[in-house]
Amino acid sequence: MTDFELCVNCMSERPVGEPCPHCGCPTDELQRPDALPFKTMLQNRYMIGLARKSNGEGISYIGYDSVLNIKTLIREFFPQTMSERLPDSQTVRVVDGSEVTFQEYKTSFLNDARELAHMRQLSAIEQIYDIFEENGTAYTVAEWEECITLRYFVERRGGSLDWNAARPLFMPVLSALSTLHSKGVNHLGISPDTLVILQDGRMKLTDFELDAVRRMDTDLPPDLVAGCAALEQYVMNYVPDESTDVYGFAACLFFALTGALPQDALRRKGDSRLMIPTSTLKSLPPYVITGLANALQVMPSKRTPHFERLRAELSAAPTVTAKIEEPLPPESAPEPEPARRGIPGIAWAIGSGVVSLAVFVCIGIFWLFPPSFGGTAGAADSTAMKATVESADSGMLMNGLDAAELSGTERVQVPDLVGQKLDDVLAAESAGTEDYDILVSDKEFSDTVAEGKIIRQSPTAGELAQKGVKIVVVVSQGAQMRSLPEIRGMSLEDASLAVTSAGLTPAKRDVFDDTVPAGQAVGYQDHKAGDSLEYGAHVVILLSKGPDPSVLGGPAGSGGT
């Protein structure tokens, strides 16, 4: 008779000593060295499986509830910057000097989990059903649900969704977020990876973590997704609010509809335009474009302040046209200006103080200026806008195309795009001067092709293809090894932008320093300007707190905490 055990990867039964027949996990699967060992029992009930994720807050595991006989998601509070696991032990030890901060964060971890556990009526969010302390730290247990990420779902659906497909997925999550914020609960990490699609087709929001992990200016390494994180999450001493989650939610909706995330908020400060493929524009109702434009403002003070307003705009509520031009409620938080996205089609160009919606036709490009909050707009304005969009569409369809062209029978020669900048190619496509559509299939590191330039294409240059052919391109990410920029004396925001622009991921640590004024960057922890690091690597920016008040006449530039 064959003996069975639980697979540590999927928690399904497998024959002892054999690979799992369900997921293929081998018998010699290794656990990460800082994680709890396989089959560790918590509360004499929950068995630990494979560690699935680790970040500044802790470690997430697949687990098994031996009482209910179900798979679980177990999260362990284990901030590695201030704690360590004792050798050959399950116990977490707090690093000397971090006791107070560790306790504060652990308390927040437990309180946040209790708030979520009290909202089990919200089916669109992760369901926590047990919370406890053990091993010198804290744990939560949530229901395990088979799912795929929104990122993978969109990829499987051809790279984008139409509004009719996206709306029933996103609106229940929007409602849940509105309720969460009414109870004072933030997420701050909404992304195509934390939004998942369940087997029954519903969308759910997962991975609730400490607010401190979703900001740059804390003691914990940040867990921010470029394109989804709002500007204020990079800014020192700014407290994110509901509009921060509005930005992340809208970025994910933008991703679902276009197949690409908005450009990183830090980079959008310099150029707030956001481009949408023309084909996507023509398929979206004007009110959806308006809602996205308002929700993706870079500056918090200009952004849609709360989810109920976003719901009204995305639902084309009758009151929206009148209210959309009214001043924001006094309690609304500061907001960002829109940004640029290198994708074919239309661009949202948002001025520093103006948000009024207008559509212009200029060589096939639509420029949208989101609605202004300085006056009132009536139904006539709404009608005029709709008419302008319709006429623009007609103009594009009638731009010298004959029946053969419209039927796709006309043949054109595929251009040579290799070596060209992707932004330039997309701009030409958006202008309506080219007879092709660009699809970015992948990005690759290259030591010879500059970042942002096209490495190769399919079909190849010179081939004959139907007019409007889709050209799939691979774009260079630049060299895999990146040089750390000089940041000494910069503000945290400017230093973060410099590091991000170099293709690296910044974090922050406060230090005393006698030579650099408080609030300015001293340099890097464990690195110096000019060091070569792998693309995406995390680097810690040392931010000066000024001289150490407890040390009088001590050596300058000590950098001690």
Image (tube, rainbow, N blue to C red):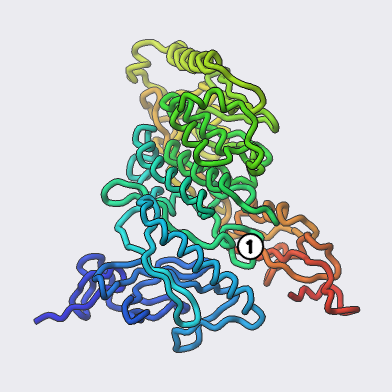
Indicate the quadrant where residue 439 lies: top left
Measured along the vertical axis of the image, is residue 305 above or below residue 554?
above
| Residue 329 located left or right of residue 320 | right
The residue that appears at 61% across and 36% down in the rendered structure is: 338
Measured along the vertical axis of the image, is residue 130 above or below residue 200?
below
Q: Residues within 10 Å of mark 1 (few under 14, many from 20)?
A: many
Residue 490 place in picture, x, y as percent = 77, 56
Q: Is residue 9 visible?
A: yes
Q: Amino acid at mark 1?
A: Ala
The residue that appears at 37% across and 21% down in the rendered structure is: 411
What residue sits right under mark 1 in the picture? 507
Q: Is residue 436 visible?
A: no
Residue that protrudes farthest toward the bottom in the picture: 88
Residue that protrudes farthest toward the right in the picture: 553
Measured along the vertical axis of the image, is residue 307 above or below residue 388?
below
| Residue 557 located left or right of residue 419 | right
Residue 470 place in picture, x, y as percent = 40, 32
Residue 249 place in picture, x, y as percent = 49, 44
The residue that appears at 32% across and 55% down in the rendered structure is: 147
Label 1 residue SS: strand
478 and 273: which one is in front? 273
Q: Quadrant of the C terminus?
A: bottom right
Measured along the vertical axis of the image, is residue 342 above or below residue 287?
below
Indicate the quadrant where residue 13 lies: bottom left
| Residue 456 located left or right of residue 340 | left
514 and 473: which one is in front? 514
Q: Quadrant of the N terminus?
A: bottom left
| Residue 141 located left or right of residue 542 | left
The residue that appears at 20% across and 68% down in the rendered structure is: 21
Residue 160 place in picture, x, y as percent = 39, 38
